[in-house]
Amino acid sequence: MWDLSRIPCKHSISAIYANEEKPEDYGHSYYLKYTCLAVYKHVRYPVPSKEEWERTKLNDIYPPIVRKTEQNPERRELDSLTKVKGNISKLQAHSQLQDLRHLKTFQEKEPKGT
């Protein structure tokens, strides 16, 4: 817990002081100021503005063209049903679409010519 929160519990502090030691000696060296300074000692310079970039003879790189994917067939049916029926909710349209599908399946299973 000491290493995660940097706040030791009071019992561990009491035990450390009873041994006449320093609580800082029980934390990981990762949390010391020295380690932090060593990690960030290398200076990072900001990227210059676009006008200052060096021009090359290579072609410019552009982002890929994003194409709209084809819509799910069920979603397409739902959208067409809401357009035909007017102002109904998606839930109502979905329910009606399910009813139409069940009716179609039932009609296909029914023997012909009876």
Image (cartoon, grey):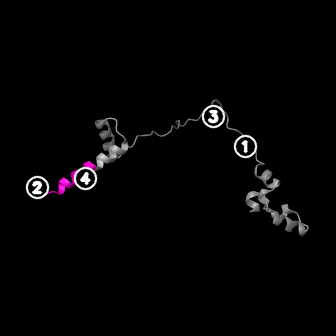
Local packing at callout 1 (Cα closer than 10 Å; few below 14, some 14-19, many 20+) is few
Looking at the rendered structure, the kind of residue marked 2 is: Lys
Q: CA distance from mark 4 to mark 3?
A: 66 Å
Precedes in sequence: disc 3 or disc 2: 3
Q: Nearer the viewer, mark 1 or mark 2?
A: 2
Precedes in sequence: disc 1 or disc 2: 1
Q: Secondary structure at mark 1?
A: loop
Residue behind mark 4? 102
Kindly indicate the quadrant of the structure image that contains residue 4: bottom right
- The residue at the point 72 percent across, 43 percent down is 44
The stretch in magenta equals 99-110
Residue behind mark 1? 44
37 is within the stretch colored magenta: no
Q: Are marks 3 and 2 in contact (CB under 8 Å)?
A: no
Q: CA distance from mark 1 to mark 4?
A: 65 Å
Q: CA distance from mark 4 to mark 2?
A: 18 Å
Looking at the rendered structure, the kind of residue marked 4 is: His
Q: Nearer the viewer, mark 3 or mark 2?
A: 2
Q: Nearer the viewer, mark 1 or mark 4?
A: 4
Q: Secondary structure at mark 2?
A: loop
Horizontal side of 38 relative to 18 (left or right) equals left
Precedes in sequence: disc 1 or disc 4: 1
Residue behind mark 3? 54
Measured from the top left, where is residue 23 in percent x and y? 85, 62
Local packing at callout 3 (Cα closer than 10 Å; few below 14, some 14-19, many 20+) is few
Residue 112's tag is: 2
